[in-house]
Image (tube, helix red, strand yellow):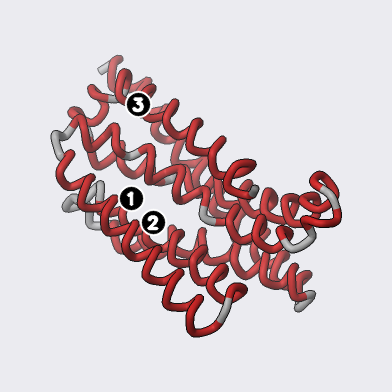
Amino acid sequence: MVQRVLVTPFGMVSSALSASLFSHARGLVAKDSVAYAQRFLAFAVVLSPLVTVGALIASESFSFVFGAQWEAGRAVAAWVTLYLAQKFIFDSTFSVLAMQQRQKAGMHMQAGVFFVRIAVLVAVGVCFGFSAALVAFSIASSLTYYCAAQLCFQSGNPGRLRQFVLGAMDWIFPYLVVHAWLTSGAFGVVSLSYAVWAGVRLWSFGASLHKVRSVAIVEPLK
């Protein structure tokens, strides 16, 4: 049920975005692939708070929408929603790989993500049960999607390590918020900390976009 309601629509949106990128972004990738990669991966900055709120809403509304018999799906909806932002970005990167004629690398990444997720799901499920397997599967999905998307844009950019660490914090914080919500543990403190972090990141993202627009306007005049 969670797969049908949440994951499938995200996949459709991701496919539409990939098609749009493929038709319009070829020139951007060829002109400045590093800058394009930075802007594209920065989508996580915007998607992170949206997915966090979506996970909380999904948790509270799932049994209300589908009936009390689906109360067990409450936690499933919350944890599954969290990795959708990373899946969205990862799926959309394949248009860029096609432009760079790196389809083989994309296939290897898809295979790696698939096997890691399955291995974590089975291993944790056998050893610790369903609840632990669900959380581990969601975390493994976010981590592998995130790393794979970063690998899609390998370059000599000196700021890659900093970007990688900041991006990792963008997907770690939502897990802390949802865990605190589901366990009723320090939710106020965790959510306030995340709100401050997300605000700073969004402000930085907005400043970066403004700088990009300014350069785009000034360069043609030169």
Residue placed at 71% from the left, 65% from the top? 191
Task: Say which amino acid is labelled 3.
Answer: Leu
Residue type at tag 1: Ala
Find disc 1 in the rendering and name its residue. Answer: 149
Query: What residue appears at the point 28 percent right and 22 percent down from the top-left corner?
Result: 219
Which residue is pictured at 38% across the width and 22% down the height? 20
Residue beneath the point at 44% across and 26% down: 16
Query: What type is the residue that disc 2 sits on?
Result: Tyr
The disc, 3 or 1, on the residue closer to the chain's N-terminal end is 3
Q: Is residue 140 above or below residue 146?
A: below
**Screen quadrant of the C terminus:** top left
Q: Position of residue 43 (x, y in %)?
A: 47, 42
Q: State which tag comes first along the sequence, 3 or 2.
A: 3
Residue 84: give x, y in percent of width and height: 52, 49
Q: Which residue is mark 3?
A: 21
x, y (%) of residue 188?
Answer: 78, 70
Could you classify mark 1 by the number of other residues whose Cα lies within 10 Å: few (under 14), some (14-19), or many (20 or more)? many
89 relative to 185 in the view: left or right: left
The CA distance from mark 3 to mark 1 is 15 Å
* Residue most extreme to the bottom: 127
156 or 139, which lies in front? Answer: 139
Residue on which disc 2 sits: 146
Is residue 17 visible in this depiction of the protein?
A: yes
The answer to which quarter of the image holds residue 217 is: top left
Q: Of helix, strand and loop, which one carries label 2? A: helix
Where residue 181 appears, as percent x and y from the top left, is 75, 68
Q: CA distance from mark 3 to mark 2?
A: 19 Å
Are dots 1 and 2 in contact, CB under 8 Å?
yes
Circle 3 sits in a helix, a strand or a loop, which is it?
helix
Q: Nearer the viewer, residue 10 or 22?
A: 10
Rendered image quadrant of residue 14: top left
Q: Is residue 128 above or below residue 93?
A: below
